[in-house]
Amino acid sequence: MGGLPANRTANGFAVSAADPRVMYVAMRDGLFKSVNAGETWRAVGSGLKDVAAVAVNPRKPDEVYVSTTDGVIFRSRDGGATWQRQQ
Amino acid sequence: MHQWSRASTALLTVLMLLAGIAPSSFAAAGVEHVHALAMEAEGRILFLGAHTGLFRSEDGGRSWRKVPLSTRHPHLDVMAVVADPKDPLLIYAGTHEAGVFRSEDGGTTWKEANAGLGGLDIHGLAIDPNVPSKLHAVVREKGEGVYRTGDRGGKWVRVDDGPAGEVKVLASVNIPTGMGGIYLYAGTAEGLQRNPDCF
């Protein structure tokens, strides 16, 4: 699980239906992505904070949604590289 | 000291409200303290579980509509939402107060699916991606532990004590290792943990 902030709460978790090795963890410090089933992680979406939950579109594996704790939704269409606020 | 800390937080909130900078981005939609996000199998509808209930969006999260789960329990804290990976009409919600609810019509109507659960405080739901009739649920407090159902919530059986630390999210993942098989991932207060699903 290298690359995830230590001793921090994992609020949300989602996996790509197309490739289950691709997974996302939502944390207070941001959103983290692994492409090797959780062996290593890197932060994606600079500026995302207080991430409470994450979901991957089962039909479009690069389309990812996150919600902050207070309900602000962001969408990425490139696997987490860039994000658009939805409201 | 504790009293002082609470009092100062309240004072700060009042000052922020007066200054117009209090966090109110989603007060209008009624979404508060989000716990879960899920998309149904067709990738058209987002479901969001929050302290103030279950919500759905059909425009990628731009607008939200509250989904009533139960007339008996009008104010449910929705801790977990999972969608069947094959059937877009089949959705499950886990609540803090009233256990698991299942919808077979895309979230329009809901029924309780709690037979066999030792408690009704659900902190995680996971659906098996290979066999979607099989789910796991994490129960806290009364009847604490991990429960499994093989018939879409018709009957639950306790199978494990569960991971250490408060569980925030649970997921079944089909890891394509040489050995194959399903792993249960749990997001907890102590980070991300995983176990082979051998229960």
Image: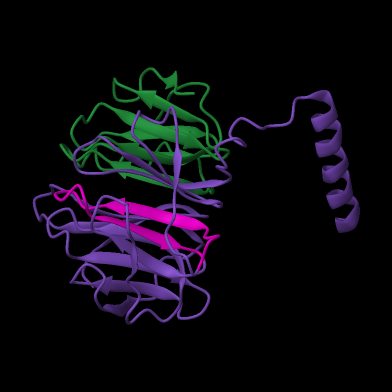
Chain colours: A green, B purple
Q: Is residue B69 left or right of residue B88?
A: right
Relative to B13, is B121 on the left or the right?
left
| Magenta range | B73-96
In the figure, A18 relative to B87: above or below? above
The residue drawn where x is 47% and y is 65% is B71
Question: Which one is in front, A49 or A69?
Answer: A69
B7 sits left or right of A46 in the view: right
Q: Position of residue B106 (x, y in %)?
A: 26, 50
Image-quadrant location for residue A62: top left
Q: Nearer the viewer, residue B96 or A79?
A: B96
Residue B105, quarter of picture: bottom left
Looking at the image, the residue that sits furthest to the front is: B71
Which residue is nearer to you in this view: B82 or A43?
Answer: B82
Q: Residue at x 25, y 36 (%)?
A: A22
Q: Is residue B82 magenta?
A: yes
* Quadrant occupied by the N terminus of chain B: bottom right
Q: Is residue A1 visible?
A: no
B186 to B37, vertically: above or below: below
Q: Was residue B197 drawn as part of the magenta stretch in this picture?
A: no
**Is B115 on the left or on the right of B30, as rendered?**
left
Task: Where is residue B125? Give x, y as percent.
Answer: 35, 60
Is residue B135 in view from this perspective? yes
